Image: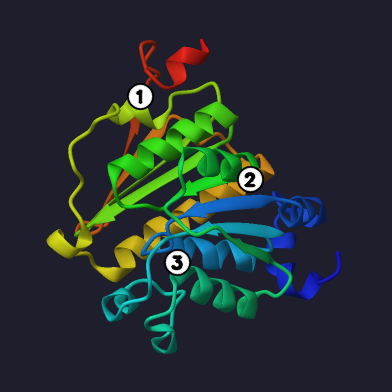
Amino acid sequence: MSDYARYSRQIILRQVGVNGQSVLRDSTALIVGLGGLGAPASLYLAGAGLGRLILSDRDHVERSNLQRQIVYRNADLGRAKLDAAADNLRALNPDCRIETRPGPLDDDALLAAVRDADVVLDCTDNFPARFAINRACVAARKPLVSGAAIRFEGQIALFVPGGPCYACLFGEGGEAAETCEEAGILGPVVGVIGAMQALLAIKVLLGIGDDSARLHLWDAGKLSWRSLTVARDPHCRVCGIYD
């Protein structure tokens, strides 16, 4: 271990240890979307010592982003999110290799990015992107950590190969999702869900626990969680074709 001091607080955890830290160092995560969810998720994964992060986004940093997208600074206004996030993540942990792939990714580019990762974090804010990411993860047989948040509400789920997929839960062609611009969002709500996405990604990489096939719903107003089992749809038009 080249930098024990940096990671010592998690290396002393029996679930991590030196071997687990080496696993993280050798792992790659793809984060699609660098907004309210992707910003904290990327910071925690870089801080945890993942060896490589692949980032994809198409937007530029706006003033309204700074309320919740904590990977950016006021000096980043007007910059491409990919460039600003990459610089700030490298400043946090220069040992984490950051790669950027400007979005929106077409189906072939998305599938290539997914195949290049060990775990995928869907931090987007619209159903077409979520369905496309899910299809790529099913085709490439890669675990998918899906998150969403709006107003005072958040949700998170882990989908792994062989289990139910995102389309089993929502079905392709779901209703248009509300946006934070339309409905509002409290910054710490996306912070919690983004951090939870990073947590699930780390657990998947380390083989800790079995968090798949569960949809976790958070009510930030009441500080309460509830969890639902997600069943596989044998007629799913995405994962069903692999039966």
Read off the residue under disc 1. Answer: 168
Q: Is residue 139 above or below residue 183?
A: above
- Residue 236 in percent (x, y) is at 37, 17
Q: Mark 2 against mark 1, which lies toward the viewer?
A: 2
Q: Is residue 12 visible?
A: no
Q: Disc 1 versus disc 3: distance between alpha carbons?
A: 27 Å
The residue type indicated by label 1 comes to Cys
Residue ID at (24%, 30%)? 173
- Residue 85 in percent (x, y) is at 51, 72
Q: Disc 2 versus disc 1: distance between alpha carbons?
A: 23 Å
Looking at marks 1 and 3 on the same chain, the residue that comes earlier in the sequence is marked by 3
Q: Quadrant of the N terminus?
A: bottom right
The residue type indicated by label 2 comes to Ala
The residue type indicated by label 3 comes to Ala
Question: Is 1 left or right of 219, judged from the image as shown?
Answer: right
Residue ID at (66%, 39%)? 207
Q: Is residue 89 visible?
A: yes
Q: Do callouts 3 and 2 mark residues in contact (Cβ within 8 Å)?
A: no
Read off the residue under disc 2. Answer: 117
Q: Is residue 198 above or below residue 116?
A: below
Q: Do callouts 1 and 3 mark residues in contact (Cβ within 8 Å)?
A: no
Question: Is 230 left or right of 86, judged from the image as shown?
Answer: left
Read off the residue under disc 3. Answer: 39
- Residue 19 in percent (x, y) is at 81, 51
Determine whether the residue tagged by mark 2 lies in a helix, strand or loop: loop
Mark number, residue 18 = none
The one nearer the camera, 25 or 14, is 25
- Residue 6 in percent (x, y) is at 73, 74
